[in-house]
Structures are given as structure tokens and as C-alpha cells.
Amino acid sequence: MVGPMVNDSELERVLWRHTLELIASPRADSLSKLAQLFAESFAVDHCSIYVLEGRTDELVLQAAHGGKGGLGSGRLRMGQGITGLAAFHKKTLHVPNMQRDPRTVLLDGQDVVYSSIIAIPFEDENELCGVLSLQSMTERRYSTEEVEILEASQRLILALLHSVQTHETMRRRSDEVQALNELGQAMNSGLGLDESLELIASLAADALHAKGAAVRLLVEDGSLALATVLTQPEASFDPHYEKRISEYVAATGEPIMIDDIRVPKDPLALGASMVCVPLVLEDRIVGTLSLFDKIVPLGTERRLFSMDDLNMLFALSSQIAAEIEDIRLTGRLQELVRSEKSQGARLRELYNRSQALLQSISDGLMAIDRDGFVEEINAVGARILGRRISPNERIVADDLIEDKPPLRSWLSEGAQFSSRVVTLNTQIGPVAVMANLQPVMDGEQHIIGAVLTFREMGEVGRLVNRVIGVQRTFSFDDILGNSSIMEKTKELARIAAGTSSNILIQGETGTGKEVFAQAIHNASAFNEGPFLAVNCAALPRDLIESELFGYVEGAFTGASKKGRLGKFELASGGTIFLDEIGEMPPEVQVKLLRVLQEKTVVRVGGDRTIPIDCRLIAATNRDLQSEVDERRFRRDLLYRLNVITIEVPPLHERQDDIPLFIERFLQTFAERNGKIVSDVSADVVELLCHYRWPGNVRELENVIEHAVALVKDRTITRGDLPPHLAQIIELGDSEIETDSTFDRAKKSHDEAVRQLYLEALRIENGDVVRAARVLGVSRATLYRRLKQHDLLSAISIMRHSSHN
């Protein structure tokens, strides 16, 4: 093979210029680009860049370019092969014909032997850093000038390597900061110790890309107890060796990295590599954190944990230790409060400790003495109340907290409660909170006070929203449709989202009313709060009231002993979406009207009012005005619901949008079924655009899913459509024309009926009762039909004309 087609000086300038560009903007693939640059500049078949790994004293492949076969296993021992010998002797080795050289060996996993190789070690202050290796399939001899250029390129490789390592270090620091932030946010979620430890293990494994994690805590007898272990579903875990290593780390206070501690022969068993760090809090070890098996891309060589991984885990460990101790201290808080106040210096020490803990927890906390006066309140509680309480201020807890029975009754009986909704009298008015009351006893089990912890209902609702997985994923950008009627509907919805008024969404089944509700919530001032959806038609008639408003203990047979929160309470600070509101029973409509008027709820079986602060969005496919006329829906409730009414148009009124839905559904179901379906025939599109779609978007989605599932080619034809469209398919275009004739006849009939109603109103001078009598229908029926034909305005016009 001949050398490069440019002269040596030009070659050196090209190498320097392009390498400096890579150094100026380092990326993860910068070394691979450098390998490509060397391969192309020297016209070789393969270029590899190895970096010395200090832990194992092995050369690890960092970048390569060219044909397969030169990679081997990705690791070389010092002295292994020509590249390993160059590293061992720190000397350039040039072998023009490898088949004649006795030092040539076939590496593990290598299936191609190159004819020539040149390996140039690069050093930093006489310390070996790695090797640059160029290989060719044919015999190749390098000139003295080329060797000098390659050896001079050591500085370029080192500079780029340092630049990439600095870039990687900065990325790791960013990941570390992000992991610390996520850990801090997660630990403030109010979880117990077990749940928090599982969360810690999960976050640590994610941060370092490990397959498993284990946390051990130091218990009173000085031993390390396994608190939690996290593994992938298919992996097995043997705690025996992990415990021995963790005990060593806890005893020495030093972190450790170790390779292959697996005992089972199963290749899926955890323990191919391990890193373990102590959890240290103020020079005191409280436990250990271990990670197993670095995750690497499929098919690549197993990587060990690095010092950067160890440093990052060590940085996380200090906060983890603090958080674990914080959770433990929270559990001891009630014990500290129960202690005798007369214990002097010891009590003062414990009191100072509890003060720090009081201000650090995320819930509001109020300490109450035996007479019902507030002794202490932390910063969170003061923020919720909107006021601070000075040490000399004597405030009765019952003046701040409304409950039945009052707190004094609970104190006198030494009773406790948990997850109870009480009302706080704050600076901005009544606020509902979820509260727990724990009595404090002296050594003789006499009541000396109590501790009340509480959390705003908005926070509780957001937690429930995360746990039960209520979806609120849609925004206005997700709503398909460019037709004028749809653009007007979306514009009205955007305006409505900027208000706090109740909203009524009307539309036929399958038009996407809940999609609009979620989009309005996400664009509103309530978007930080929960979004709770309730289908009034899906709930049994005798359960809908308890679901919406909650119930107290013993409200009915089978009720929970602790009672239950209603959806309105859980939605506090957010949005509650009542779908199919027209199906709500009349007796529940009365209670809903009171909730909307007074912004409070009364649980089933209770007599205490609980303030709520949430936005109501209702939806229905019924004509609620007709339901009012037929006395199936309360008129006053309708007025409360439809402060802003949004009419979602049916699909047949927005035919221009049907191709958009076809394209979206085609892509979605093709990906879901793993099929390549690229098009829909023109006659099918025309057919679908002329169909009336009684099921609207939901029916169209079903049709496309059916077609994608059955289609055999890449284009959907009429034969792929569902059977319920078969009649339209058989009749073809003539049926479309017949439908048009029918539509014209129907319009003529509707116009005749419209004129009949107008004539009846004219004869009776706008008197609806007498006009209904003339037509032989009820007053409510006539009102409904006048509304259907948009004739309600004609009543007042005819009445005005008769008076004139």
C-alpha cells in the first residue's frame, strides 16, 4: 500500500488543523473522529487509540476506525501483541510484515490479521497514557518523516484526550448535581424509611448506570442490617459476599471497588463488578451503599466502575446519610416531645435538636400543651397559617383549627387521629389540610400535650395524582384540526383556560371532550395542582356521592374505619373533571350545587364543612337545556356549570380534519403493530370523508386500527375496512349521491317544520304555551324544538310586534 497523496509538511498541517478543531469543541466521539483522521491521512485500513487503565494496568480501546478484526476484546495486557509491546517498552514499533514477525499474535475475539502495523505510545511527563496503532491489510513501510509526524502527534492526542476527559468530567459533575437535586426532591416527598431507601437505591443505580444496588444500615447492636436491595427482574443476588465487603467498608470508613464477587455460576447473577461506599454523617458511619455491575451497551466488553464513579457515589453518600438520619430523627420526634420538661440540660439539648428537626420537615407542625394552647409552630406551619406566633403569645389551638369534636376533646381523652381533614383559620381565610394528631404522655402515661402535623390539601392531591397515575398529558398542540370551526373552538378554550370560571364542555361521544379538559388544565393557573377525572356515568348511583364528597367513619355498611377523602378534596389546588355530568342523579346535583356555591364540601355521614379550592370542568354529550326542560337536570346547577360553554364539533362538521386524523392514526397503529403501512387509497379517503361518523374521532380511530391490523400491503384499500362499512362500500359512489339526495329532502323537511313553528308562534303572538297547544305538543317539547331550529329569538320578536 502506498502512503498518503500529500507531502509530509502538508500532512502535518492537516493533522494539526483538524485536531485543534476537535480540541476546541470536544465531544464524546472526538477520539473516534481523530482515529478516522489518522486512518484517512495515512491511508491505512484501521486505526485504534488505546488508553491505559490505571486500576488494571491494561490498555482499553477508546476509539477505532476502519474494518473489523482489529478490535479484539477491547482490552490488551501490557506486552500483549505489537501494541502491548510498544506500550510496555514506551517505544514506537513498526512492523511492515506481521506474518514474518514472531511477536505477532492473534488477539482474543480477533478474526483478521493485518499485514503491517505501527504502534506509537504517547506519554505525559514520562508516564504512559496510551498507544496509537495504525494497521494495513497489505505490506506498508513508513518513511522516517511519517514516523516523526506520528511521534510528534503525541501532543495532539494527549491534548484531545485531556479535553475529552475534561468534557466528560464536566458532564459527570452535571449528572452528579442533577442526581443530588433529584435525591433532595425525592427525600422531601414525605415517604417512610423503607420507601425512601428503595428510592435512594433506585436513584443511585440510575445515576451510575448500575444493574443493582443495596443499602445496609448500622443497627443498635453494631451490626449491618440489609435495609433494601434493588435488582433487575432477571438478576439473582447473593448477599453473603456483599455483606463481608460492606462490613469491611463500615469498619474502615474507606470506599472499595472490587471485581467479580459472584458465587453462583449463573451469568445473570449480580457481582461482575462492585463499588461500595460508607454512609458517613458528622464522622459517624450510619450504613453502606453498594452498586453492582456497570451497565454497558449490548455486545461490548464489560466495563468496571471507575474512580469518577466512585467519587460521584461518594458525593451522593453524604447527602444520603443526612437524609436517612433525618428520616430516623423524624420517627424519634414524638419520643423527644414526650420527655419530661424538668430534665434540665439533657432536655435542653434534645429540645434544640427537635427545633432543628421541626424547621427541616416538609409538613406543618404544631406543638400543643395540655390546656390546648399552642406552644410551638414550625416555619412550614407558619407559612400555611400566614402568621408567626411569638413565644409570649397565648393562642388557643381551637381558634386556629376548626374540627368536630374540637382539639380539646381529643386532648382530654388522650385520643389520636391520622389523615383527618381539618380547617385552618388562616390570614387568607379557611384552608383545608390533612392532619395527624399524636398525644404526648409523661412517664406515668398522663396527657401533657399533643403534636399536630398537617399538609395542604393541594400537596396531598398532587401526591395522590402521582400515585394513582391520573393522566393530564394533552395540551392544545396535541389537538388535531385546522378547520375554521376547530380553530374557533380551540381559541375559546385557550381564553377559558386563562380564567378561574367553571367550564362546561359539550359534544357528541368520541369528540375528545377530556382532551380539551386536560389541555385547559395544563394551560391554566391550576396546572401545578392535580387533575382528577370522574366519569359520573361509570359510578354506581349509590357510590357517586361518597366518591365526590368523601365519607366519615361509619357512614354506611362497608365504609372504611378512617373514612375517605372525596375527589373534590383531593383536587384542591388543581382541576376536577366531571365527565358525563348529565348522568348525575338529582339528589347528588343538589349537593354539587351547594359545593359550587359555597366552595365547601360535607362528607357523607358528617356535619363538618371542609373548604375546597379547585376548578371544575364538566362535560356531557346531552342537551342539558332539554334535560332541564324535562326536569331531569337542575336549572340552577346548569347556570353554575356553564359559566363558559365550549361546544366540541362532531367529526362530520369538520371533514377537512379527517385526513389529519387518518395520517396520525395510521402512523400510530403501524408502529404499534410493527408494520410498514405508508398510505391510504384515495377512494378510501373520500369514503371516510363522506361518512357521517356517529362515533366521531373514537370510531375513526377504531376503523384505522382495524384496517392497519388486517392490511397485507403497504396501502389500505376498501377491502381492509371494518364490516360495518361494507354496505357503504358495496353501494359505492352512487350511495354517496343518494345520501346527498336524502340530505336535500331532509333539509326541505326541516325547513317546512321550521316554518310550521314560526307560523304557530305568529298566530299566538309569541305565546309559547298557546302555540304548543295549537301544535299538540307540550311546552317543554316546543322549547326544545325551537332551540334545535334556532328559533328562540323569534319569541321575543313576535311578542314585541304584537304589543306594537
Image (spheres, grey):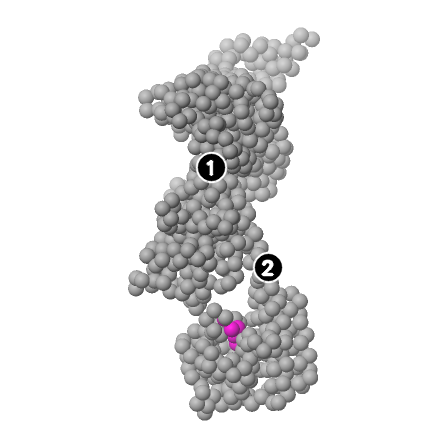
Residue 329 visible within the image: yes
Which residue position is annotated with label 1? 330
Assess whether residue 286 is covered by the magenta stretch. no
Q: Position of residue 372 (x, y in %)?
A: 50, 19
The residue closer to the viewer here, 509 or 280, is 280
Residue 242, given in percent of the width and then of the height, sits at 37, 57
Q: Which residues are magenta?
A: 48-53
Farthest top residue in view: 803
Q: In the picture, residue 554 is in which quadrant? A: top left
Say above or below: 751 vs 716.
above
Q: Mark 1 belongs to which amino acid?
A: Thr
Q: Residue 275, image x and y in percent?
A: 44, 59
Which amino acid, mark 2? Met
Q: Residue furthest front?
A: 344
Q: Which quadrant would the N terminus be assigned to in this image? A: bottom right
Which residue is depicted at the point 49% across and 63% down? 306
Q: Main secondary structure of the magenta part?
A: strand
Which numbered marker is on residue 170?
2
Secondary structure under tag 2 reads: helix
Name which residue lies at 69% across and 79% down.
13
